[in-house]
Image: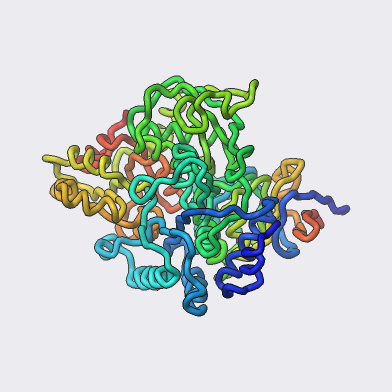
Amino acid sequence: MKLNDEEKDILAGKVGPVPQQALQHQIKVGEFFGAEDLVPVTQAHLMADTESLGEAGVRWLEGLVAATEGQRRVRIATITDPRGTDFANAEWLGQTSAMLDLERRAISAFEALGVAMTNTCINYQTIQAPTRNEHVAFGDTGVVIYSNSVCGARSNFEGGPSALAAGLTGRTPRYGFHLPEKRRATLRIDVDFTPTSLNGWGALGGVIGRIAGNYWAVPVIEGIEGAPKSDQLKHFGASMASFGSIALFHLAGLTPEAGQLSDVAKPGLPSLRVTKADVDALQRSYHTDDAVDVVVFSAPQLSLYELSDLAGLCDGRRFTVPLLAVTSPQVKPDADRMGYTSRIEAAGGSVLSGMCFYQSYAREISEANGWKRLATNSAKLVNILGGYGYRPMLASMETCVDAAVSGKLART
Amino acid sequence: MSSRIFRARHAMGSTVRGPALVANDGFSARYDLDRIKGVFSRPAHKLVGQSYVGKILVLDTAKGGVATAWMLHEMKSRGIVPLALVFNSVNPILAQGAALGDVSMLAGFDEDITAAIPNGAEVEVNPGEGVIKVVG
């Protein structure tokens, strides 16, 4: 890879061993993908829950912190994805003191590195959305696909080590979606309906993700009517990224790079049709039981509008199974202040903050609480939780709330 | 038995040799694995119930989220890790995870590598030369 003088100095260790190690990692990854050089980035978003890090990852971070003060701080805005716990609710969730101790060590290390503990996977709604053509190094696939597709920013999936490396060097290898030619559509998807519910948008994203199939695929979608809302595209993108490892989609006539189809698609690009029946089939395929042990709204974290809707559905209800709603530390105080939290809690639900259900020792939580049959309106969550021993089921927010009351998930 | 050699466009790591565990399916450390037991755990995965420990995983493509970037490093620290990853295509997360965890990896072949390598075959992964060889 071509390096400028500043990068050569970093690689030579002239600004310390931590940035040097970060750049070595970036070069290893960049050369694997044939990157010619590095591109400056303005923000990094770091996925680093302790379930993923483990003891080994936390020790690795603490090893970075052991470097000389002044030579180990991030040089651009570097923020975090959800953590592995909400300390205020950890005990009843069944999380152990060992998990919390590891979490505290990780937080301490990140803070010493200059990382801002935002603990959110909806930073594009709550912290600062990137702008068109802004090069960033974002982790969390849902953050990347939204930022690339809806904002027109430029990011690859940056896992925790690479996002941290980008924070420490202020740059990232220039490959993949940093390159204009990689952002053009590789397939056309023609949909014959426009979802209205969040689970519907998520299921549509899941169907398209399965079809597109791998990271380098870029679907351009035609046939969407009206202007989708941020929460709808949040679920759509997060699910597409989860089911297909997709990092960028275009909506013809809607998203910034696809004012017209021809802006992103060459003539003759093959087109596939996706129908409402395909989306309904995906949702039905997860409906494997009628009874429910727990209801979870998470993945991505809920916006203030989603919590407002949920509070409205909780009024006058009394839950017989646990209902968890997970949001960001930025949204939670507003939800408290506006009374949404208390209305959800009055029905027997819980509002958690700064974590995400699947990033918080989901397997151990399942075993501690006897939760197997889980209802959610998140298509991303149902795609993930099967591997954690759950039987996840996908339904609308309304149907999930009804299930929290009756213990039964209605078939639709 | 004469060796068969397949060349990859992307390569990382050091030479390793071991049994191939092959399926035409995706891979995510978070979605697909019980990382404590060292087996594939997602019910829908074609390798469900099978141990990946010490195997050279030959799969189609990377799936899912960003956690694999940390998880390979964590799995390596406990010795509950694949010996190498050989994929038709990978995403950045898998490459980043292999770089941090020091797991050998090949990706990008002219043929479907999951059809070319027999399940259970003894194979050698040589990232320096960018090849995987069936040796037994």
Q: Position of residue A257 (x, y in %)?
A: 52, 32
In the image, residue A108 sits, relative to residue B4, either above or below, namely: below
Q: Would residue B107 be visible to someone looking at this image?
A: yes
Instruction: Where is residue A260? Give x, y as percent.
Output: 52, 24
Q: How is the image coloured?
A: rainbow
Residue closer to the observer: A34 or A160: A34
The answer to whether residue A386 is above or below residue A287 is below
Viewer-nearest residue: A217 or A244: A217
| Observer-nearest of B126 and A338 | A338
Q: Is residue A289 left or right of residue A217?
A: left
The residue at the far right in this view is B2
Residue at x 22% of width, y 54% of height:
A333
Residue A62 position within the rendered picture, expressed as x and y whole percent measured from the top left = 47, 75
Residue A184 on image: x %, y %: 60, 34
Q: Seen in the image, is A344 located left or right of residue A55?
A: left
Disc tally is: 0
